[in-house]
Structure formats: C-alpha cells, structure tokens
Amino acid sequence: QVQLVESGGGLVQAGGSLRLSCLASQSILSINVMGWYRQAPGKQRESVATITSGSDTNYADSVKGRFTISRDNAKKTVYLQMNSLKPEDTAVYYCNAVLTRPDHTTYHYWGQGTQVTVSS
C-alpha cells in the first residue's frame, strides 16, 4: 500500500506559478510511474504529466512548455512546477503512483487531491 499526500495547491492569478508536491509513504525508487492528473468540474480526470523511475517524462499537450514534473527520490516526493497558469488549469490535482509487482500485478494509488484555482 502506497499513501500519497499532495500539497501546494491554492488560488493564483493568471500568469502566476504554483508548485505541487506529492509525498509518498515509501521509497519511490520502486514505483514504475508517478504522475499528476487533474479533474475540473463536470469533466473527466485527465493526465497532466508523468515521470518514470528512469525519469522519462510525458506531458499533456495543453501544459507542454508551462509545467515541469520532477522527482526527488531521497525525499520520496514528486513535484509539479506550474508556470504561466491559465484559468483553464483550474481543477483538483491528484497524484498517482503505478507500482508493478514481480508477479506483474499492477497497482494504482491516488492521493486525496489538492485544489488549484486560477483567476482571470
């Protein structure tokens, strides 16, 4: 069982920046993929950015060039640096961890979410 705790959300004006943090309850070295997802009111949850254990990254087209995902294995933390924020970035942001066991069973873990609100 991996517990994830997000922090860093808040209210910011358009053009501003926020950094989200996701603290895991265990070492993230063995976690295959960690990522950030978001869900706006009335919309489906969508992938924002992911990072593998080898630090390969992937971003949604809507955030490329503005958001950066990174990981600090020693601190068991994944970050999402969000710059040039837009009102359409307003959503609850969730941290996700994908862990594949030696028997190839895959587990998905989610944090409780943190609200990001961007005012125009």
Image: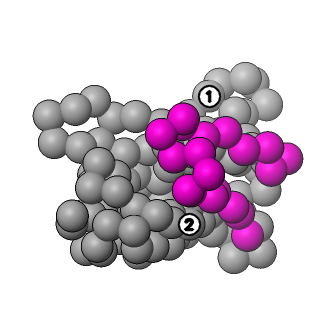
Residue 12 % position (x, y): 30, 74
Q: Is residue 17 visible in this depiction of the protein?
A: yes
Q: Is residue 10 visible in this depiction of the protein?
A: no
Residue 1 % position (x, y): 53, 50
Q: Residue at x 29, y 48 (%)?
A: 88
Label 1 SS: strand
Q: Which residues are magenta?
A: 54-72
Q: In the image as oriented, which residue stretches furthest toward the right? A: 54
Crowding at dot 2, Cα within 10 Å, few <14 / some 14-19 / many 20+, comes out as some
Q: Residue at x 29, y 42 (%)?
A: 39
Amino acid tagged 2: Gln
Instruction: Classify 89 as above or below 20.
Output: above
Please name the residue that numbered disc 1 is placed on: 106
Mark 2 and mark 1 lie on one chain; the one further toward the N terminus is 2
Instruction: Classify 120 as above or below 55.
Output: below
Label 2 SS: strand
Q: Quadrant of residue 37?
A: top left
Q: Is residue 55 left or right of residue 93?
A: right
Amino acid tagged 1: Thr
Q: Which mark is residue 81?
A: 2
Q: CA distance from mark 2 to mark 1?
A: 27 Å
Instruction: Classify 65 as above or below 42.
Output: below
Crowding at dot 1, Cα within 10 Å, few <14 / some 14-19 / many 20+, comes out as few
Q: Residue at x 67, y 39 (%)?
A: 58
In this rendering, the count of numbered labels is 2
On whether residue 15 falls in the magenta region, the answer is: no
Residue in the foreground of this view, choosing between 49 and 15: 15
On whether residue 66 falls in the magenta region, the answer is: yes
Residue in the foreground of this view, choosing between 22 and 47: 47
Residue 83 % position (x, y): 51, 66
Residue in the foreground of this view, choosing between 9 and 118: 118
